[in-house]
Image: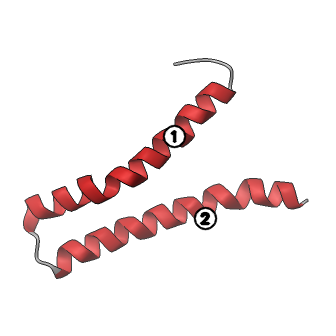
Amino acid sequence: MTATFEAWITPIMIGGLILFMGFIIWDLAKQSQAGRFGTLMLFVVLGAGMLGYILKVVITWLIERGGGI
């Protein structure tokens, strides 16, 4: 029961955290009046860590599935 709960809740909570961090980046751009280019750069630079994590999850899933791309 616990393992099933953990298997379901972990991706849901991490996904929620990623969405919340996206909101934080958007709010930071809005409060600092960054403009279009500044907002884009904030999302690119600060979102790179989130993208790295998402790519890690996808690559791990592909490897565990027993195949490549």
First of labels 1, 2 by sequence position: 2
Q: Position of residue 43 (x, y in %)?
A: 26, 58
- Circle 2 sits on which residue? 13
Is residue 61 shown left or right of residue 41?
Answer: right
**Crowd tier of the residue under label 2, counting other residues whose Cα lies within 10 Å: few below 14, some 14–19, many 20 or above:** few
User: Of discs 1 and 2, which sits in the foreground?
Assistant: 1
Residue at position x 14%, y 78% in the image:
32
In this rendering, position of residue 1 left or right of residue 46: right
Task: Give residue 31's mark.
Answer: none
Q: Residue 48 location in percent, x, y?
A: 33, 50
Question: Is residue 13 toward the left or the right of residue 56 in the image?
Answer: right
The type of residue carrying mark 2 is: Met
Relative to 62, residue 12 above or below: below
SS for callout 2? helix
The correct choice, above or below, for 66 with respect to 24 in the image is: above
Q: Residue furthest right?
A: 1
Dot 1 amino acid type: Lys
Question: Looking at the rendering, which quadrant does residue 10 occupy?
Answer: bottom right
What label sits on residue 56 in the rendered view?
1
Q: Residues within 10 Å of mark 1 (few under 14, many from 20)?
A: few
Q: Is residue 53 above or below residue 64?
A: below
Point out the image quarter for the N terminus.
Answer: bottom right
Q: Is residue 62 left or right of residue 45?
A: right
Mark count: 2
Q: Which residue extends farthest bottom?
A: 31
Residue at image coords 48%, 46%: 54
What's the residue at 19%, 76% (across, down)? Answer: 30
Q: Whole-percent x and y of residue 39?
A: 17, 63
Q: How is the image coloured?
A: secondary structure
> What is the quadrant of residue 25 in the picture?
bottom left
